[in-house]
Image: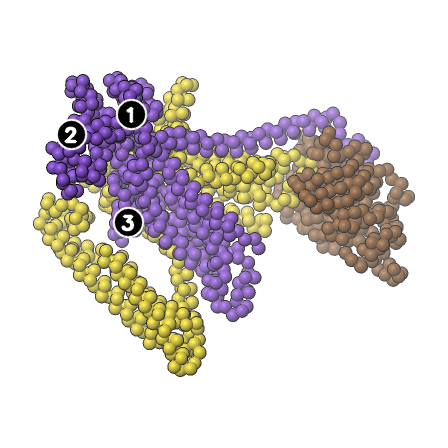
Amino acid sequence: MSLTLLFFVLLLLSATGFYMGRAAAVGASATTQRPLHSLSSFYGWYVLLWCGIPAMMVYVVWIALEGPIVELLVARTMPEAAATGNMGLALSEMRNIAAGITPPGAASAETLRAVEHYKWLSTIAGAALWVVALAAGVMGLAFARGRVSPELRARNSVERVLEIFFLIASVIAILTTIGILLSLIFETVAFFLQVSPIEFLFSTAWSPMLAIRPDQVGASGSFGAVPLFLGTMLIASIAMLTAVPIGLMTAVYMTEYAPKVVRAWGKPILEILAGIPTVVFGFFAALTVAPAIRDFGALIGLEIAAQSALAAGIVMGLMLIPFVSSLSDDVINAVPQSMRDGSYALGATKSETTMRVLLPAALPGIMASVILAFSKALGETMIVVMAAGIAANTTLNPLESVTTVTVNISALLTGEAEFDSPKTLAAFALGFVLFVVTLALNLVALKVVQRYREQYE
Amino acid sequence: MSDVTHSGGVGLPSRHIGDEAAKRLKRRYAAEARFKFFGMAALSAACLSLLVLLWTIVSEGYTAFQQTHIKIEVEFSPDNIAPAGTADRRRLMAGDYRAVLFEALDRKWSDVTDRDGQRLLEGLFGSGAEVQLRDMVVADPSLIGRKVEVWLLSHSDVDMFFKGHVGADEASGGRMAARQVAWIEALRAKGEIEKRFHGRFLTGADSRDPEMVGVLGGVMGSIFTLAICFLLAFPLGIMAAIYLEEYAPKNRFTEIVEININNLAAVPSVVFGLLGLAVFIAFFGMPRSTPLVGGFVLALMSLPTVIIAARAAIKAVPPSIREAALGIGASKMQMIFHHVLPLAMPGILTGTIITMSHALGETAPLLMIGMVAFITDVPGGALDAATVLPVQIFMWADNPERGFIEKTSAAIMVLLAFMLVMNAGAIWLRKRFERRW
Amino acid sequence: MDAKQMDAIKPAQFPASADASPAKMAVKVACRDVNVHYGTKHALKGVGIDIRERQVTAFIGPSGCGKSTFLRCLNRMNDTVASARVTGSILLGGQDIYDPKIDVVQLRARVGMVFQKPNPFPKSIYENIVYGPRIHGLASTKAEFDEIVERSLRGAALWDEVKDRLNEPGTGLSGGQQQRLCIARAIAVSPEVILMDEPCSALDPIATAHVETLIDELRENFTIVIVTHNMQQAARVSQRTAFFHLGTLVEEDDTAAIFTNPRDERTQGYITGRYG
């Protein structure tokens, strides 16, 4: 709570800085009889930034680092836990006791000591933060206030700082990518130290759940991810077989045939379909589509699993229809009207024009949209979690139940996760594979789209 | 030229007239009609699947706003609760309301004396009825010692049967015993069982019993999460877009930033969950299961899309406006804040709202960071453990009990309504401030 | 108008091949009282004209005068514009092309069109040519298609330039070659009439000269209608010229007559460059 309070105190301090800076500038201008270089409010902003930025930087860095540092200090007082190698567990127990989540009753004496130490350090750190952050703010304020004079180019300085803020904001996207890469690579390497990459990539035995049984300390579940890769491919392929023909034909119909009324209704309907959350599609798949497919199979004497790849794939395909159709719509529309004119002037019908001129001309763009849709299908999670199940069958039969990469990522990480078990790390290894594959697909698609755009510009 | 003979040229009959040409033409028009039919079929398939989906959800879910209640006379005897005049909330909460209910059952069905029968009677009511009685007494302690007629929530199984979602016995999906069916029919004849408006579904949080669940917990979680997400993604997105559109030099670095943003927009959402788990929770030690972390993760996920939308809106402001501002001596920053941004703002807002509505439906990354916990309180802030509406839907959908199908569908209706409002807002903004250059 | 001015715009010489009087040829397309509305805009007002066989008829006039609009009526390309409405009668070889019994696809096979900007399909040169014959079912064997390709490319005076690279994309040719490819593509279908909508406006002078020579040669086998706002071009390639102004057909006559002795003041004003 005191953190929030400090935040507002710092804001208040900065606001004070604004008024002080502005008043100082106006005053200085009046006494020296010289005009201000910038509008008076820029002097206010100048002081505000000098006050607020250091204080907030201290605040944010402190909060980010306080936890890990305090825990490091506490961990050094816990030789027993360090000896047994259960430091992670001991620390989380200690945290929970300190936060009052678990009663201290069953804890060891060492843990209780650590709890006291932890609380003490946290209190010290909290108080120190107040002092340091306020000091940084006040010092910045005093410094900037001292520099205010009519000649100070306050506007230029303020705009300079804003520009740097803008740059930082645009770099966040890169930081995110680096964050994703680092966290995935870090945990994936940790995983491969325990499980051989060869097993992961080529073995067909997948049973990670075994590894969490207490009598199997360390890694001994099997982590052959081939069934996951196959299952992902199978479901994504079924989805593409559904989405691409329907989506493409929809786009063709909407761009070339549909009368105004149909377009006026069709577009929003497709947009609604595109806006439906995947969890809803998942529920629909599990509640309606899967049973319907199974019943249909029973009717014609086919045995279809309750959670068949077919059901998940078809529903995922439904989800992707608007995606494929809107992207294809764009690329078909981008084919110049002169191509259509040229074809019609030769006496071609609409379908001949579409099939023989428009689609071939738009092919790169359509390929790109198909690739993007495929990458989306690979990464889709909720539909498969709810409709495909977790049975790791090595099969390409769409009537059977298969599992996917994303299902297992979410299954392995749902619930309390400890970062040293191969079960948790396996999720990151799977995530890494997924990230690399989808990234490659996206890059290819973006490249294709770029070249396609250049062709008609 | 003279070696060229054109059958369609001057003096010769055209190859485009005549029986053979007519026959060819007929074939071509058949192909044309086929093609057009495929197009219409594809569009119809897309529309139809949406209709079936919505129909499934609404037909399953609309009944959840009503719940089956049974009228019964209960006595709040002090023995079971606390002496009359007690105002201490904690003591009132601790009362034995199950006993209150059972006594009432014994009085109403005094003819049922065998143990099996009593168990079946008790089975007509779930834990909801007890909570209802408790809440009545907590709200009004003067009830203690009095007898009142109340409409109590029936068990979810009764509710499903009474609403007609299932039949009575197991073969038709129900879980009712023959005697229970007989009692229900008797109650129905007397008008002592009916569907009544069920406000708890809109004001409550999660529960183990379908008749007790509510969506408010998820809705509030979603609101807090989205608020954090918006507060981060919106300003950062605008700032990044301003930099890329107005300041960034055309160099390798800018190019990498742009490619990176486009790629990030297509990274699977589940990967952002992994990022959140590894960075925010494991590294920075932010609290698990909270809207704070959820908002951070969704903000990182939405940021690229917001940037792309904001850039498009900023780019759409014609250069003449910029030149006009610079021409009268405005600084670049003043030009941006006084002219470009206000003109681009409707577009930016529209894009951001649509992105937020996608973030609202996002489920997978939030599972990774523990927003999938069973939480029976409505969260009061961004630091309380919470779940969000789509995750709530996921958890209910996972529950095998029949009553949850109805609740899941209804929660989906609430979620879709939530999104509809957001999108309607975006459309309104677009229409209201649409500008043509 | 004084003689000096006249000299300035008079073509160097009229095409030598103008046999007899151009007005004596049989009528190929007869138009009566053609009106076109785009929405509420009355774009073409009561145009009546006879287009004669085996001749080049040029439509001239300032931009927005309706000449292109009228051209697009002749093969019903205006059908692709949703707001366009055409009334009046246009008879091709005695048949009204706006008769519901007439099939627009068939009509366009008989009345080909070449556009302002060369618009080859993003396919090979070969595929560009055979596209029309293929959709109309005019040939079935490879040999037949090969023959059509050679004949059409020779007809468009392009064969020698591209015969070794028929499988390269048509979009890789130069502007003038692309336009001749489009002409080859049009004649591959064996039309009776070829409409050309400012076919040289996107070309450089040398390419323009090529195309103009080609038009003159094509006259032997086809009826050609060309829209141009280049009066010299009209004078060079056409036998008959029609002058459009503000949506009306002002005057139509032998090209020589129009350029030397226009009857209407507006025509004279236009060809002497008083407006345009």
Identify which residue, A225 or B288, lies in the foreground. B288
Mark 3 packing: few (<14 Cα in 10 Å), some, or many (20+)?
Answer: some
Label placed on residue B193 = 1
In the image, residue C230 sits, relative to residue C220, either above or below, namely below
Mark 2 and 3 residues: CB-CB less than 8 Å, in contact? no
Q: Is residue A267 left or right of residue B300?
A: right
Q: Amino acid at mark 3?
A: Gly
Judged from the image, the secondary structure of the residue bearing numbered disc 2 is helix
Sequence-wise, the earlier of marks 2 and 3 is 2
**Distance from the alpha carbon under mark 1 to that under mark 3:** 39 Å
In the image, residue A397 sits, relative to residue A19, either above or below, namely above
Mark 2 packing: few (<14 Cα in 10 Å), some, or many (20+)?
Answer: some
The chain displayed purple equals B
The chain displayed yellow equals A
Mark 2 and 1 residues: CB-CB less than 8 Å, in contact? no
Identify which residue, A327 or B415, lies in the foreground. B415
The picture places residue A205, in percent across and down from the top left corner, at: 30, 33
**For the point 53% across and 63% down, which residue is it?**
B322
**For the point 45% across and 59% down, which residue is it?**
B242
**Distance from the alpha carbon under mark 2 to that under mark 3:** 36 Å
Residue A158: which quarter of the image?
Answer: bottom left
**Image mark 1: chain:** B
**Distance from the alpha carbon under mark 2 to that under mark 1:** 21 Å
Sequence-wise, the earlier of marks 2 and 1 is 2
**For the point 70% across and 52% down, which residue is it?**
C202
Q: How many marks?
A: 3
Q: Residue reaching furthest bottom? A: A32
Residue position for label 2 = B99
The colour assigned to chain C within the rendered structure = brown
In the image, residue A399 sits, relative to residue B412, either above or below, namely above
Label placed on residue B381 = 3
